[in-house]
Image (cartoon, rainbow, N blue to C red):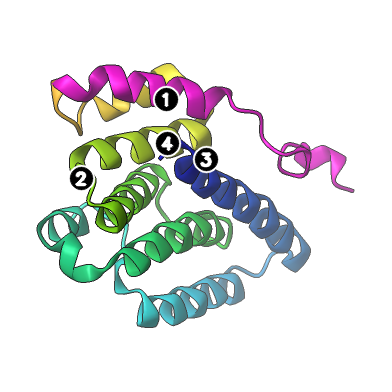
Amino acid sequence: LVVAGVACGWMFRASDKASAAASRAMGDRPVIKALLAGLLLSICGTVLPFSLFAGESQTQMVMESYAALGATALIATSFVKAALTPACIHFGWRGGHFFPVIFAGIALGYGIASIGGFEPMFCVAITTATLVAGVQRKALVAIAMLLLCFPVQSIPWIGIACLVGASLPLPDRLTKKQSEQG
């Protein structure tokens, strides 16, 4: 579960770095950037409809029907959501990454739970905590934010997952500062 959350976090970081570079290379072309992001989002949304929205409303739908959605679709949705979110932000779309990253973690957890018949809420809590902390790199902020989303009995597990997600080193190619990238 932690490895899956870390991998999804790395997907977010890779997309963040690549889309920031692409946005800088395109210069001041807000309409073209927004259209490209919309095109990318619509193509992904055609195959994975849950990748279209931030996730606040879709979370309940996933909770109620995750078994019918299928593990592959849920796991793919989580990785696509992690990649699309920073791309949309860098290409001028409004919003932030908190809800989309939480939703990606939830989809990932339910997908993994579907594969092995594991306890769904435990899987969701661990993947979400690891992913959120891995993206934010601040375990305490991630724990505080996730206290609003999960039952009290999962707090110790969320805490451990957040500490691991925030403290695992990122690959070198995902940590170089923007100013170092010529």
**Residue 23, percent from left and from top:** 68, 61
Sequence-first tag of 1 and 2: 2
Depth check, front residue: 116 or 110 = 116
Task: Please give the residue where the numbered disc 2 appears in the rendered image.
Answer: 120
Q: Which residue, as the protein is rendered here, is positioned at the far left?
A: 64
**Residue 27, percent from left and from top:** 74, 64
Task: Please give the residue where the numbered disc 1 appears in the rendered image.
Answer: 162
Sequence-first tag of 2 and 3: 3
Which residue occupies 35% across, 19% down? Answer: 159
Circle 3 or circle 4, nearest the eye? 3
Q: Give the answer, above or below, for where 145 lies relative to 95.
A: above
Task: Tell me the crowding category of disc 1: few under 14, some 14 to 19, or many 20 or more residues within 10 angstroms, Cα based.
Answer: many
Task: Please give the residue where the numbered disc 4 appears in the rendered image.
Answer: 132
Magenta-tinted stretch: 153-182
Mark-to-mark CA distance, 3 and 4: 9 Å
**Residue 63, percent from left and from top:** 15, 54
Cβ atoms under marks 4 and 1 closer than 8 Å = yes
Q: Is residue 97 within the magenta segment?
A: no
Sequence-first tag of 3 and 4: 3
Depth check, front residue: 129 or 137 = 129
